[in-house]
Amino acid sequence: MPNPGRPGGPRRWRAPAALLFAALLGAAALPAALAARFSDSARATNFRVTATAGTAGTCFTLNADAKCADPDGRCCLGAGAEVSKLLLLTNGFNPACSDVSAAKITVNGQTVEAQSGKADKRPAIKLPLDSGALGGPVTFCIDPSGITGCSTIGQLCGGRLCSFRFAASGAHQGSGEKAKCSVDAAVENGDAGAQPLFSFQLVNPDPSDPYKERLDRLMKAAARRWEDALNVQMPPGSLPNGLPVTGAVLVYYQSVTTLAKGTYGVTELLDPRRGLGGGKRTVPLSGTITFNRDKLGSGSPSDAAWGAIVLHELGHFLGVGITALWEERGCIPSKCGATLSFGGGGPETTYYYKCAAARAQYRGLGCGKALRIESNRGSGQDCVHFAEKDLPNELMTPVVGTGVLSRVTLGAVEDIWGRGSINYGVADPWLCGGGTSTIQAAALGAVGSPKPEVSFELIQPDWTD
């Protein structure tokens, strides 16, 4: 694979054999499909948390009158549903945010005492609710200005989003059967100066890149989506050549003219870093996405289509489908890559994802007990994506589709970065059975080493020029 010239960029670490996997861009346009997944009709729950105007701090409103796609869904509850617990998950990496006693909180205009709680190892604020049915909207306002060192809503929530979790029970809107569920919601808090806990450091090293503006837009949008999802801080470090990386995953990207005909781009993941969580975890450190300049001009795929691909690639940057990390965590058996013949029609063997968070999210969505790893499509798709049959139209399967970021993929990221590292409220509405897809993945290359430290993803179309 060509190495794009970038003075001072990260060196490429060469494993004995590289893991190669690919995402192919289909010809169909995606903007309408992408927009549809955010409509009320696609929601899996009727509960909503929205930001509201207020004079007593930053205010949010909880209501239960929205539409949902599946009336029998666990969290699609009818009138009379009870909310038994409501938590605001706070910044777990700022010790000052753990003591919320100085925060001023009102519920429906009445001052209440701030109570500390915890969820997934993250400190939280318990917001008291009257017992019984949620008879109407509940508005709660939070003023953290009295908390020394955590005095803004952005500092308290760890970024521009505030994450809420609440437990509800009641009868399904459809069947009428009783159900209990847990709901996550992420809401913009209006703090324009809020900085995310996690960040990508995005660098286009070519100031004369004719597609720099478009690539900047695509990369920033995808990075922001993932930054909103992660509630974790990476310790600062440096690349092997001494280039500092200030607490971020470093991503180089640019367009070039040297890629093979028909190839849309190449993604390379480089230089894993140890040290997260007291030195116990290896996490991705840096990488590059090289786009084919010929595919970015007139007649190229839409920004929506490219955006789904870039979001998928950054999911790999976070460790999803990176065999070395999945094996290190015990998420997949080492024999998965060793027993499959990539590109050569390997044995049709079923392998299951073993790590806890993604499995729990898969079960919680009612999709089944066992989440499979793709192992029967061959040619580099196997062992590095979730099984297409189990998660159709989802972001991190061989078929990216409209790029739906489900709770399952967020769980897989949490399995890499540690418990409490994910804001599940940013997940897209997604139901088991997904839908049709228009972006397909296929393979180029082979896997040799059971623990490769570098991987490539080749982006090319599924039609012939």
Image (cartoon, rainbow, N blue to C red):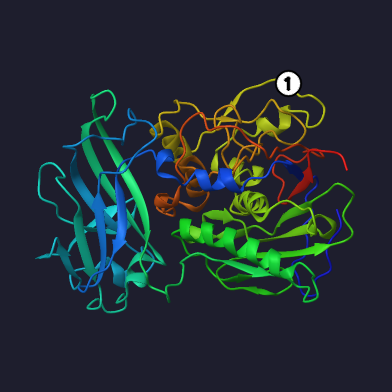
In the displayed structure, does residue 162 sit left or right of residue 235? left
Query: What's the amino acid at mark 1?
Result: Pro
Q: Nearer the viewer, residue 98 or 140?
A: 140
In the rendered view of the protein, which quadrant contains the C terminus?
top right
Image height check: is 264 above or below 101? Answer: above
SS assignment at label 1 = loop
Image: 162 above or below 362: below
Residue labelled with disc 1: 347
Residue 405 seen in the figure: no
Q: Is residue 138 left or right of residue 417?
A: left
Q: Is residue 465 above or below residue 111?
A: above
The answer to whether 398 appears left or right of 33 in the picture is: right
Instruction: Give the left or right position of residue 419, taking residue 398 as reference.
Output: left
Q: Quadrant of residue 32?
A: top right
Relative height, residue 347 to residue 242 (above, below): above
Identified at 78% across, 60% down, the residue is 12
The residue depicted at 58 percent of the width and 55 percent of the height is 283
Pinpoint residue 191: horizontal percent, then vertical percent: 38, 73
Q: Residue at x 19, y 44 (%)?
A: 83
Determine the residue located farthest toward the top in the rendered image: 348
Q: Nearer the viewer, residue 298 or 377?
A: 298
Q: Position of residue 67 (x, y in %)?
A: 34, 40
